[in-house]
Image (spheres, rainbow, N blue to C red):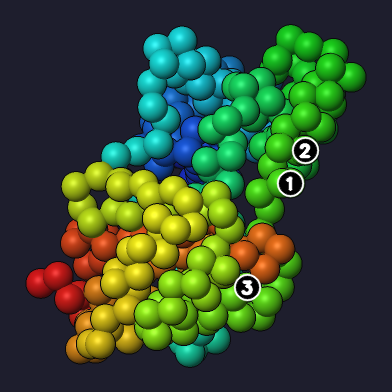
Amino acid sequence: MQQSWLAERFEDERRHLFGVAYRMLGSATEAEDAVQEAWLRLSRSETDEIDNLGGWLTTVTARVCLNMLRSRKTRGEVPLEAGLPDPTVVLDDAEPQDPVERAMLADSVSIALLVVLEQLSPDERLAFVLHDLFAVPFDEIAGMLDRSPTSTRQLASRARRRVQGHAPSHGISAQREVVDAFFAAAQEGDLARLVGVLHPDVVLRADAGSGVTTYRGAETVAGNAAMYAHAERITRPALVNGLAGVAVTLRGKLFSVMGFTVVDGQVTEIEAYAAPDQIAKLAADLGLESAHG
């Protein structure tokens, strides 16, 4: 009976725990592993001594992630997965979202943010993610890091300054104007206008199913304009990871999804999702057919 009750309570917390782990690790697979480890530790613990189960699980999950990050740094591993993580996609002309869909969108995280977080030290990342994204008090975080609350606050502040320089513009309408200008310039083959819409250090990550190909710099990204401007491909406005993006259809079937990060009126990050398995899953979620068979 006790184990059944614990399993139910854990399932109530699973989504929150995955959100913490994913932002800490930047990998859905590793995040699932961390959450599973938290469950194993819970199942072996004396639960009568746990006053706040949600807080206890968050602490355990965060510590598991911290150990994974420190181990990753020691081994010098490349943290990003071979493919781009599955995006959250909602078409602009879709029916109004139900509360669950809205919650999923609010919980989404841009690949751009994950890339910035990867540049932080493990301790900085934990302090920033737990405090700024999940409102965990510094006193609690300090205990996880074996630091003083003041030192922990400084870690989060340092991380925050680095993240803020990559924060997207507020307001979907402002982002949408820039994305629309991007596609208008691409479709007209106006490379000068296209370069003007792009930040000089823009990064494009494209995943067609065999790993992520990265393009850097406005001229390089603009030079791939044929990727965005095809006579038979139609772009449908969408929210991708909570930001302005598009779903690209080919003869009515979903061909790819593109997400954009816009900062100060310029595109700084683009994620192009075209892996067949990923598009098939997204097409089913959106009520479309996949163009990849």
Residue that appears at 40% across and 36% down = 80
CA distance separating discs 2 and 3? 22 Å
Figure quadrant of the C terminus: bottom left
Q: Which residue is mark 3?
A: 175
Residue sticking out furthest to the front? 192
Q: Which residue is mark 1?
A: 164
Q: Answer with the quarter of the image where residue 284 lies.
A: bottom left
Residue 152's spot in the image, x, y percent? 80, 21
Residue 112's spot in the image, x, y percent? 54, 49
Identify which residue, 197 or 40, lies in the foreground.
197
Is residue 183 among the parts visible in the rendering? no
- Under circle 1, the secondary element is helix
Q: Amino acid at mark 3?
A: Gln
Q: Answer with the quarter of the image where residue 72 lies.
A: top left
CA distance separating discs 2 and 1? 5 Å
Q: Which residue is mark 2?
A: 161
- Under circle 2, the secondary element is helix
Q: Amino acid at mark 2?
A: Arg
Residue that appears at 71% across and 63% down = 264
